[in-house]
Image: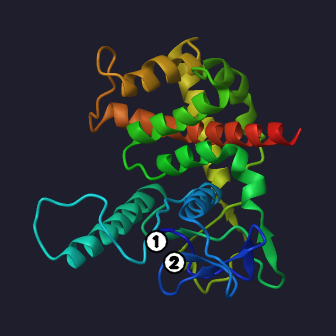
Amino acid sequence: MVGMSSVGIGPVTVDGKYALILVHPTNSIAVAPPACKEHPTFKEIVFYTNCRAYEHDLPAFILPERRKALLKPIEKGRAANINDSYYQSLEMGYEAINSIRLGPLAYVNFRWPGFNVEVDIPYTTKYSHVAKELSLYSTAIRQLDPLSEFLCYYRIIESVTLSNGKDWISRNLIRLKKYDYGFLEFGTDTQLGQIRTKRTNIFSIYRNRALKRIEDLKNKLGGRSIADYFYYENRCGIAHGKTGVKEYDFGFNIEEIAKDVYILKLLSRIAIENKMAEKKR
């Protein structure tokens, strides 16, 4: 999990059967069974990876013990070097994404410390009903460009609503202002060792940017609904190549959609948590 603090995971278990262990000095988190117990399946590891990516809003990927590049480069070379290079490049790519979103020295803290008491995170009970949506969210935060990220978040809303999402977005925009997204602590390496008088919640920053963008859009759209703009102009303009195409113009389109992403990110989280809540009823 690139971008997570290298400290902060105490005695934490998952589903009452696996321990989460931070592998120093890397960003990696191992999912370890008790002695003589079976290891988690690959499918479980993928699910847990998506859960942690969602909870911490960080790009995450699986690093196999026996590494094999999923895509072979054109350049020839020793298999071991190519395989190692593939995963090193993935990590550097996700570090670059975090530097763009959060800053080059930024990190987030693990949300469930468990410093003094044991903490168990019931991922399967909590998230199994939204496993597909968490996979889509995990994909979204691995995207470098705003066009792809916007489209990935929109897919989540389509998945939850089983529709084009316009009516749902119109109804739920008003919820952004007061919705409780939880607390995800943000910090920078320049703050290490300093006494901080106030903790920073990254979701509060996202909310402020989203609300500012909503006000700007109300002025710019001249009575046209934000939901229509998101669907017809952005979603369809990104996904399709016939008419009204949103091109990567290195300027206006990218700047505008990068601002829209904050709104859609938070809406997609509301959609996921709505679906989780419906399952409990």
Three-letter amino acid code of the residue under disc 1: Leu
Identified at 53% across, 32% down, the residue is 154
54 shown above or below 207: below
Residue 226 occupies which quadrant of the picture? top right
Three-letter amino acid code of the residue under disc 2: Asp
Residue 176 occupies which quadrant of the picture? top right
Locate residue 206, reporting x and y percent. Answer: 60, 48
- Residue pointed to by mark 1: 105
Q: How many marks?
A: 2
Label placed on residue 189: 2
Label 1 environment density (alpha carbons within 10 Å; few <14, some 14–19, many ≥20):
few
132 shown above or below 42: above
Q: Secondary structure at mark 2?
A: helix
- Cα–Cα gap, marks 2 and 1: 5 Å
Q: Quadrant of the C terminus?
A: top right
Locate residue 190, reporting x and y percent. Answer: 51, 78
The answer to whether residue 69 is seen in the rendering is: yes
